[in-house]
Image (cartoon, grey):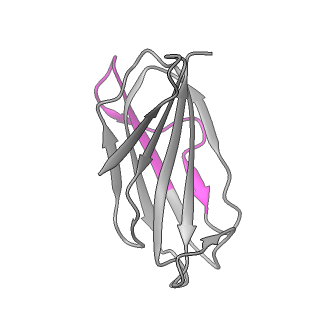
Amino acid sequence: MTAYTDHGDSELLDVISAEVDNTTTVTMEGFTRAMAHNFLGVQMFDTNGDLMVDADAGSFAVTFKTYNTQQWEAPPDASIDSEAPTTLAWNGNVVAVKVVPTTLHATVVTWKVVLTKSRS
Protein backbone atom coordinates (compact mmCIF):
# COMPACT_ATOMS: atom_id res chain seq x y z
CA MET A 1 0.00 0.00 0.00
CA THR A 2 1.26 3.43 -0.91
CA ALA A 3 0.03 6.67 0.64
CA TYR A 4 -0.18 9.86 -1.37
CA THR A 5 -0.29 13.28 0.26
CA ASP A 6 -1.44 16.13 -1.96
CA HIS A 7 -0.55 19.45 -0.38
CA GLY A 8 -3.47 21.18 -2.11
CA ASP A 9 -1.44 23.43 -4.34
CA SER A 10 -0.68 20.88 -7.07
CA GLU A 11 3.00 21.75 -6.69
CA LEU A 12 4.06 19.06 -4.23
CA LEU A 13 3.26 15.37 -3.77
CA ASP A 14 4.52 12.98 -1.07
CA VAL A 15 4.46 9.29 -1.93
CA ILE A 16 5.11 7.02 1.06
CA SER A 17 5.24 3.24 0.92
CA ALA A 18 3.98 0.89 3.60
CA GLU A 19 6.55 -0.40 6.09
CA VAL A 20 7.98 -3.70 4.85
CA ASP A 21 10.40 -6.27 6.27
CA ASN A 22 14.14 -5.98 5.67
CA THR A 23 14.19 -8.23 2.59
CA THR A 24 11.16 -6.90 0.69
CA THR A 25 11.46 -4.82 -2.49
CA VAL A 26 9.25 -1.71 -2.67
CA THR A 27 7.74 -0.75 -6.04
CA MET A 28 5.57 2.36 -6.28
CA GLU A 29 3.82 3.18 -9.56
CA GLY A 30 1.14 5.35 -11.07
CA PHE A 31 2.02 8.85 -9.97
CA THR A 32 2.06 11.96 -12.12
CA ARG A 33 4.87 12.63 -14.55
CA ALA A 34 4.17 16.37 -14.36
CA MET A 35 6.25 16.80 -11.21
CA ALA A 36 9.78 16.52 -12.54
CA HIS A 37 11.78 17.09 -9.36
CA ASN A 38 12.19 13.89 -7.34
CA PHE A 39 13.62 13.41 -3.84
CA LEU A 40 13.79 9.86 -2.45
CA GLY A 41 14.88 8.58 0.93
CA VAL A 42 14.34 5.55 3.14
CA GLN A 43 13.36 5.34 6.78
CA MET A 44 14.48 2.31 8.80
CA PHE A 45 12.90 1.03 12.01
CA ASP A 46 14.20 -1.23 14.80
CA THR A 47 12.41 -3.91 16.87
CA ASN A 48 10.70 -1.23 18.97
CA GLY A 49 9.41 0.56 15.88
CA ASP A 50 11.79 3.45 16.52
CA LEU A 51 13.28 5.34 13.59
CA MET A 52 16.95 4.45 13.07
CA VAL A 53 19.46 7.02 11.88
CA ASP A 54 21.76 4.33 10.52
CA ALA A 55 22.24 0.58 10.34
CA ASP A 56 25.36 -1.52 10.78
CA ALA A 57 25.43 -2.74 7.18
CA GLY A 58 23.55 -2.85 3.91
CA SER A 59 22.27 -0.59 1.19
CA PHE A 60 19.28 0.16 -1.02
CA ALA A 61 19.40 0.04 -4.84
CA VAL A 62 17.10 2.55 -6.57
CA THR A 63 15.68 2.44 -10.09
CA PHE A 64 12.85 4.35 -11.77
CA LYS A 65 10.67 4.37 -14.89
CA THR A 66 10.14 7.53 -16.88
CA TYR A 67 7.13 8.29 -19.01
CA ASN A 68 9.42 8.34 -22.05
CA THR A 69 11.01 4.89 -21.83
CA GLN A 70 8.74 2.84 -19.55
CA GLN A 71 11.92 0.87 -18.70
CA TRP A 72 13.68 0.56 -15.33
CA GLU A 73 16.66 2.95 -15.25
CA ALA A 74 19.12 4.02 -12.58
CA PRO A 75 19.12 7.66 -11.41
CA PRO A 76 22.50 9.48 -11.37
CA ASP A 77 23.01 8.28 -7.77
CA ALA A 78 21.42 4.85 -7.59
CA SER A 79 22.27 3.64 -4.09
CA ILE A 80 21.54 4.61 -0.50
CA ASP A 81 24.00 3.38 2.13
CA SER A 82 22.09 2.23 5.22
CA GLU A 83 25.05 3.19 7.41
CA ALA A 84 24.78 6.84 6.32
CA PRO A 85 21.38 7.31 4.64
CA THR A 86 20.97 10.29 2.34
CA THR A 87 18.25 11.66 0.08
CA LEU A 88 18.68 11.00 -3.63
CA ALA A 89 17.57 13.79 -5.95
CA TRP A 90 17.06 13.86 -9.71
CA ASN A 91 14.96 15.50 -12.41
CA GLY A 92 12.78 13.59 -14.83
CA ASN A 93 9.20 12.65 -15.60
CA VAL A 94 9.25 9.63 -13.30
CA VAL A 95 6.09 7.51 -13.09
CA ALA A 96 7.42 4.62 -10.95
CA VAL A 97 10.26 3.84 -8.53
CA LYS A 98 11.68 0.57 -7.21
CA VAL A 99 13.89 0.26 -4.12
CA VAL A 100 15.65 -3.02 -3.33
CA PRO A 101 17.33 -3.64 0.06
CA THR A 102 20.68 -5.41 -0.06
CA THR A 103 21.95 -7.35 2.97
CA LEU A 104 20.50 -5.02 5.59
CA HIS A 105 21.76 -5.66 9.09
CA ALA A 106 19.31 -7.57 11.30
CA THR A 107 18.78 -4.48 13.49
CA VAL A 108 16.67 -3.07 10.63
CA VAL A 109 13.37 -4.85 11.14
CA THR A 110 11.21 -2.77 8.79
CA TRP A 111 11.72 0.14 6.41
CA LYS A 112 9.77 2.37 4.03
CA VAL A 113 10.34 4.65 1.05
CA VAL A 114 9.54 8.37 1.16
CA LEU A 115 9.39 10.08 -2.24
CA THR A 116 8.62 13.77 -2.64
CA LYS A 117 7.80 15.08 -6.13
CA SER A 118 7.56 18.77 -6.97
CA ARG A 119 7.06 20.97 -10.01
CA SER A 120 9.81 23.41 -9.08
**Residue at point 34% right, 47% down?**
2
**Residue at point 43% right, 14% down?**
34
- Relative horizontal placement of residue 119, taking residue 101 as reference (left or right): right
Of the pair 70 and 8, the residue shown nearer to us: 8
Q: Is residue 67 above or below residue 5?
A: above
User: Which image quadrant: the C terminus?
Assistant: top right
Q: x and y percent of residue 7 in the render?
A: 52, 27
**Residue at point 71% right, 63% down?**
84
Magenta range: 61-81
Q: x and y percent of residue 12 in the render?
A: 54, 25
Magenta run includes residue 106:
no
Q: Is residue 5 above or below residue 87?
A: above
**Residue at point 51% right, 47% down?**
114
- Relative horizontal placement of residue 49, taking residue 69 as reference (left or right): right
Q: x and y percent of residue 15 in the render?
A: 44, 40
Q: Is residue 78 above or below residue 116?
A: below
Of the pair 82 and 113, the residue shown nearer to us: 113
- Relative horizontal placement of residue 49, taking residue 67 as reference (left or right): right
Total number of numbered labels? 0
Q: x and y percent of residue 27 in the render?
A: 33, 48
Q: Is residue 71 above or below residue 3?
A: above
Magenta run includes residue 63:
yes
Q: Looking at this rendering, what residue extends furthest in the front direction? A: 8
